Image (spheres, grey):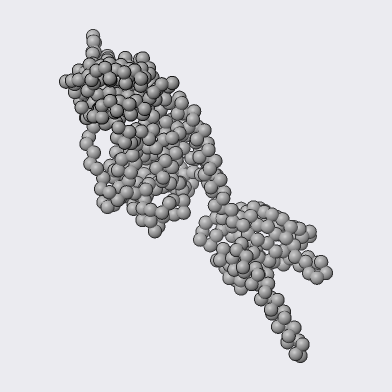
């Protein structure tokens, strides 16, 4: 009797030791009989699947993997079990109690009794959802980077060409000639075409490397409304806004975020060929409620929901890839540009969709607490009473020539330099009221070095930096580099006239 008691005590202790051991293992562990019915598990398993040991015992694995048809591997295991027990490693998905689908690797090995007879299996679950997500994210970033190298190169050359075309058109418009009405009309359509080309290069440039956006602190309300109205103009799609008055401000490149909103709204409209409503909602998301993909902090969350055709689940992962499109005339660039821009703003973009019901795009942008600056409306009248002498530095002759024509038209006198050394030499020999420096001069001293040298000569110099790379850090932070103004190529006669007026 006493012996029996100590024996049962021994068994109890062994069981306790066994359970303590597996409870200490941080991965979810389970064991089951050869028919696939659970016999027990460890603490990590209970926590991971939100089920207690008592509830688990006796259940079949099919009950745990909530979506058996999505897990052919799992049914394959059950079939194997009766005949030939063997160890295995399977990737499958599990419906987590919080409702999300988790990707897991399950490793199983047969357990035998003292006689070596198989009595069941022991297995461990390894959740690889996060690893998978970050792998996908990295591949996406890699793809966009390689596209960026190409796009950046092309867009730079293209921008210079556009500057010449646009400059010549705006002058031709002003000088006019015979049959002026007709001519004006033709030149205006040419100008519109250049604007479209300019838009495309700007989109391509957003992919290019080294791009910090040209950021300003703004309230995004106005931008949301304007871009939406502009994009939906003349279409059979209505818009509905839900924006609280106390929406936090954001620090953004308005051009770029405008593109993001425009691309999403355009997709929404294209997804509703029969018409419908696109709902735009903005809200403050405070630090405490920020999801895992973002650094802690306050965000403005923008949700854009349509009632369109929806996106099939198997496509949801691909819509942000460059050139992925399901449209006959689509470019497949819209959403990859959105992704790239939002990434550069330290934000987050994702999509949810239900076929036949609609799609919601969600964008998070970091919020700033400061009140936004009220920005004046850009003037569209040319000031022709410009006075003073301006030095223009650009490596391309046609650019110098057209900028020269424009400045002379505006009333200024102009000198030219092909590179930084020329500019410095000229500046030493005579005085200028302002200088316009191109940021990149291939094989020569560009705007960044030139301004340093010029400021040594004249600390009060009025310099404007000009570049096709609107997202070069100097362009957003030009004051820190010693410039008083900035202008992005290609520019119109109005834009250059305004910038000059501003610095002089
Ligand atoms: N609101 C939406 N509703 C349905 N499908 C969408 C929506 N937005 C994007 N998509 C899908 O994502 C694809 C990629 O979009 P995008 O990158 O803008 O390129 P494009 O519009 O040129 O096809 C689209 O072709 C479409 O299949
Ligand atoms: Mg699109």
Q: Disc count in the image?
A: 0
Work out which residue is located at the far top of the displayed protein and give it. 178
| Residue 350 percent location from the top left of the image | 45, 46
Relative to 70, is 331 above or below? Answer: above
Rendered residue at 37%/37% (across/down): 213
Q: Quadrant of residue 435?
A: top left
Rendered residue at 76%/90% (across/down): 1
Rendered residue at 57%/49% (across/down): 132
Q: Can residue 496 be seen in this view?
A: no
Q: Is residue 474 visible?
A: yes
In this rendered view, identify the residue nearer to me: 401 or 453. 453
Work out which residue is located at the far bottom of the displayed protein and give it. 1
- Is residue 501 toward the left or the right of residue 25 in the image? left
| Residue 94 percent location from the top left of the image | 59, 57
In this rendered view, identify the residue nearer to me: 428 or 11. 428
| Residue 383 percent location from the top left of the image | 19, 23
Work out which residue is located at the far right of the displayed protein and give it. 115
Q: Quadrant of residue 235?
A: top left
- Is residue 214 toward the left or the right of residue 499 in the image? right
Rendered residue at 53%/47% (across/down): 134
In this rendered view, identify the residue nearer to me: 45 or 439. 439
Which image quarter is the C terminus in? top left
In this rendered view, identify the residue nearer to me: 232 or 28. 28
Relative to 290, is 33 above or below? Answer: below
Q: Quadrant of residue 437?
A: top left
| Residue 323 percent location from the top left of the image | 50, 33
């Amino acid at each position: 009797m006493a012996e029996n008691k100590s024996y049962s005590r021994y068994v109890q202790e062994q069981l306790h030791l066994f359970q303590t051991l597996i409870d200490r293992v941080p991965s979810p562990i389970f064991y089951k009989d050869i028919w696939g019915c659970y016999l027990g598990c460890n603490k990590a398993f209970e926590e991971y699947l939100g089920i207690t040991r008592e509830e688990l015992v006796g259940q079949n694995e099919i009950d745990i993997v909530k979506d058996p048809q999505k897990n052919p591997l799992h049914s394959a295991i059950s079939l194997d079990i009766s005949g030939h027990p063997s160890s295995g490693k399977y990737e499958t998905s599990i419906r987590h109690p919080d409702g999300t689908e988790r990707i897991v690797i399950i490793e199983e090995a047969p357990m035998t009794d003292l006689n070596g007879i198989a009595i069941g299996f022991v297995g461990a679950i390894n959740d690889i959802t996060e690893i998978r997500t970050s792998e996908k994210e990295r591949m996406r970033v890699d793809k966009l980077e390689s596209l960026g190298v190409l796009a950046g190169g092309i867009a730079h050359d293209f921008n210079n060409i556009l500057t010449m075309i646009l400059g010549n058109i705006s002058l031709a418009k002003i000088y006019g000639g015979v049959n002026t009405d007709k001519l004006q009309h033709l030149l205006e359509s040419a100008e519109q075409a250049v604007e479209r080309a300019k838009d495309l290069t700007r989109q391509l440039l957003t992919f290019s490397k080294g791009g910090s956006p040209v950021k300003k602190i703004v309230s995004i309300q106005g931008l949301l409304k304007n871009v939406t109205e502009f994009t939906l103009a003349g279409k059979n799609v209505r818009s509905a806004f839900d924006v609280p008055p106390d929406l936090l401000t954001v620090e953004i490149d308005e051009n770029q975020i405008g593109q993001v909103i425009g691309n999403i709204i355009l997709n929404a409209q294209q997804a509703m060929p029969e018409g419908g409503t696109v709902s735009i909602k903005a809200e403050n998301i405070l630090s405490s409620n920020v999801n895992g993909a973002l650094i802690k902090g306050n965000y403005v969350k923008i949700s854009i929901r349509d009632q369109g055709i929806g996106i099939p689940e198997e496509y949801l992962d691909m819509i942000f890839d460059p050139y992925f499109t399901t449209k006959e005339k689509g470019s497949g660039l819209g959403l990859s540009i959105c992704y790239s821009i939002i990434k550069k703003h330290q934000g987050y973009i994702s999509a949810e969709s239900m076929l036949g019901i609609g799609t919601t795009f969600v964008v998070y942008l970091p919020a700033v607490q400061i009140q936004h600056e009220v920005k004046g409306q850009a003037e569209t009248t040319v000031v022709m009473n410009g006075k003073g002498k301006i030095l223009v530095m650009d490596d391309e002759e046609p650019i110098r020539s057209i900028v020269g024509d424009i400045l002379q038209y505006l009333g200024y006198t102009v000198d030219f330099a092909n590179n930084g050394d020329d500019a410095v030499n000229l500046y030493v020999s005579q005085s200028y009221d302002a200088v316009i420096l191109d940021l990149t001069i291939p094989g020569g001293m560009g705007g960044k070095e030139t301004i340093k040298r010029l400021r040594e000569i004249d600390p009060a110099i009025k310099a404007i930096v000009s570049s096709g790379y609107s997202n070069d850090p100097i362009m957003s932070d030009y004051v820190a580099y010693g410039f008083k103004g900035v202008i992005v190529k290609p520019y119109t006669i109005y834009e250059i006239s305004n910038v000059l007026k501003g610095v002089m």
